[in-house]
Image: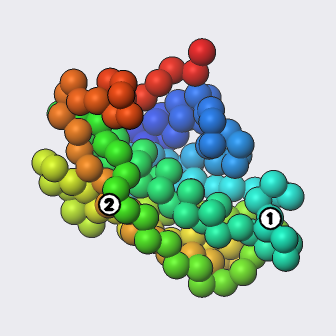
């Protein structure tokens, strides 16, 4: 089953919660082959020097990789969970809109590897990252509960 990337993005935007809502991630496209989202920088994204906190870059990179990997894994009834996040900070950003694009490098039965970039409003690379994710079999537990997406209730 193929999901239209703009429809998947609209669904994600309509159902944002937790960290994604707090960081104000706005999805443009989401598929098993590419996830693209933006973040309009505000004071909540800054660290003490008034630049975007490195955790924002790492979190956005991991979140988008997780979305893409999950869209791929769901076709087989699986879920995914992040194992590693390697984020490199390239250029400081103070304001504007960040755009993150993540694409898969490998998609296996047991793990996936995603890579991407975050660019600032001027189109210059602000961060790059790779995320390795573990594919969980149906019925797997994660932190003592069944693995999978929890509904916002």
73 displayed left or right of 34: left
Q: Residue at x 71, y 43 (%)?
A: 22
Q: Is residue 115 left or right of residue 128?
A: left
**Image quarter for residue 49?**
bottom right
Of residues 51 and 7, the one drawn nearer to the viewer in this rendering: 51
x and y percentages locating residue 10 in the rendered image: 56, 34
Which residue occupies 51% across, 60% down?
Answer: 61
Q: Secondary structure at mark 1?
A: loop
Numbered badge on residue 138: none
Say the numbered circle drawn on residue 46: 1
| Residue at far front of view | 144
> x, y percentage for residue 70?
34, 41
Contact (Cβ within 8 Å) of mark 2 with mark 1: no
Query: The C terminus lies in which quarter of the figure?
Result: top right
Q: Residue at x 42, y 45 (%)?
A: 67
User: In the shown orientation, is residue 22 left or right of residue 4?
Assistant: right
Which class describes the residues within 10 Å of circle 1: few (<14), some (14-19), or many (20+)?
some
Q: Name the residue carrying label 2.
A: 132
The percent coordinates of residue 7 (x first, y second) are 48, 34
The residue positioned 63% from the left and 63% from the top of the image is 55
Q: CA distance from mark 2 to mark 1?
A: 26 Å
Q: Is residue 74 visible?
A: no
The image shows residue 2 at horizontal and vertical percentages of 28, 36
Mark 2 or mark 1: whose residue is earlier in sequence: 1
Along the viewing direction, whichever of 62 and 29 lies nearer the viewer: 62
**Eyeballing the image, is 74 above or below 23?**
above
Q: Relative to residue 138, is residue 44 depicted above or below?
A: below
């Amino acid at each position: 089953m193929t999901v239209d990337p703009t429809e998947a993005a609209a669904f994600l935007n309509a159902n944002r919660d937790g960290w994604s809502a707090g960081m104000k991630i706005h999805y443009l496209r989401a598929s098993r082959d590419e996830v693209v989202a933006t973040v309009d920088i505000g004071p909540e994204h800054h660290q003490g020097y008034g630049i975007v906190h490195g955790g924002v870059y790492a979190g956005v990179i991991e979140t988008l990789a997780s979305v893409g990997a999950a869209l791929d894994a769901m076709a087989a009834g699986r879920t995914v969970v992040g194992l590693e996040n390697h984020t490199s900070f390239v250029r400081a950003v103070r304001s504007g809109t960040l755009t993150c694009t993540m694409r898969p490098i490998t998609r296996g039965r047991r793990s996936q590897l995603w890579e991407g970039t975050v660019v600032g409003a001027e189109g210059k690379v602000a961060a790059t990252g790779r995320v390795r994710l573990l594919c969980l079999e149906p019925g797997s537990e994660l932190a003592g509960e069944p693995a999978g997406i929890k509904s916002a209730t």
